[in-house]
Amino acid sequence: MARLPSAERRRQLTEAAIRAMARDGVPNTTTRSIAAEAGVSLSVFHYCFDSKQELIESVITTITGHYVTVVKDALRPRATLEETVRAGFQAYWDHVRAHPDEHMLTYELTQYALRRPGFEHLARRQYELYAETYADLIEQLRQTMGLRLHVPAPVVARYLAAMTDGLTLNYLVLGDAAAWNDILDTVTAHMAGLVSEP
């Protein structure tokens, strides 16, 4: 087994944990099964992570990072504000459709953390991360397009987090992909109404 830097090994184990948890469920995923998924010894896992809490936080942060990267890339300025915002939502939606198990895992992680004593802070951190992520995306749009918000940025960020959370869960439950174009158009029009272009 090649010796990897600790940060790279943590990344490898986190991605293995995401695969194992998405396949087997959070409660059924053990440190041993994660190590096996990553192709490393159990001692390597314990060298990289002090606790299951630390691993779960890494999983939450990594999953969020997967879709934030594609959304940030999609948010380059386009001809109109609506086109730019729509491109960001479309990138997120495309990620949900391509990786439904990963998005389903985020809901399972929330429930797992809320029901397990001592893990509650991870559910809170998960939703704080969502709001922080949207705040960063809003700031990106403000800087690249010179937008002015009609509502405070933290309120818009939490609203977007709640809205996409609900829409994602709705899709995972109902699987109605055909309805999403109209939904994305509606969300885009609403968001565009909350800002002014220079």
Image (spheres, helix red, strand yellow):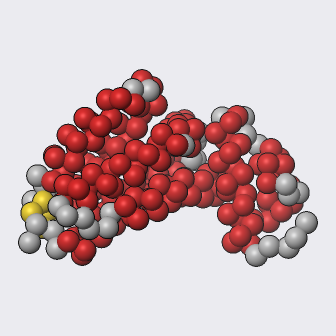
The residue nearer to you, when weighing 169 against 124, is 169
- Quadrant of the image occupied by residue 28: top right
The residue nearer to you, when weighing 68 against 120, is 68
Image point (40%, 58%), residue name: 71
Q: Is residue 44 above or below residue 112?
A: below
Q: Is residue 104 above or below residue 83?
A: above
Quadrant where the image shows the C terminus: bottom left
The residue nearer to you, when weighing 117 against 174, is 174
Image point (85%, 57%), residue name: 40
- Quadrant of the image occupied by residue 76: bottom left
Residue 152 visible in the current orientation: no
Q: What is the count of numbered marks?
A: 0
Quadrant where the image shows the N terminus: bottom right
Q: Can you name the residue that lies furthest to the right here? A: 1
Q: Position of residue 86 (x, y in %)?
A: 27, 51
- Quadrant of the image occupied by residue 135: bottom left
Q: Classify residue 87 as left or right of residue 64.
A: left
Image point (40%, 38%), residue name: 168
Q: Position of residue 93 (x, y in %)?
A: 40, 44
Residue 194 visible in the current orientation: yes
Q: Classify residue 42 as left or right of residue 64.
A: right
Image point (39%, 26%), residue name: 176
Q: Can you name the residue that lies furthest to the front here? A: 79
Q: Position of residue 44 (x, y in %)?
A: 83, 62
Q: Position of residue 183 (x, y in %)?
A: 26, 36
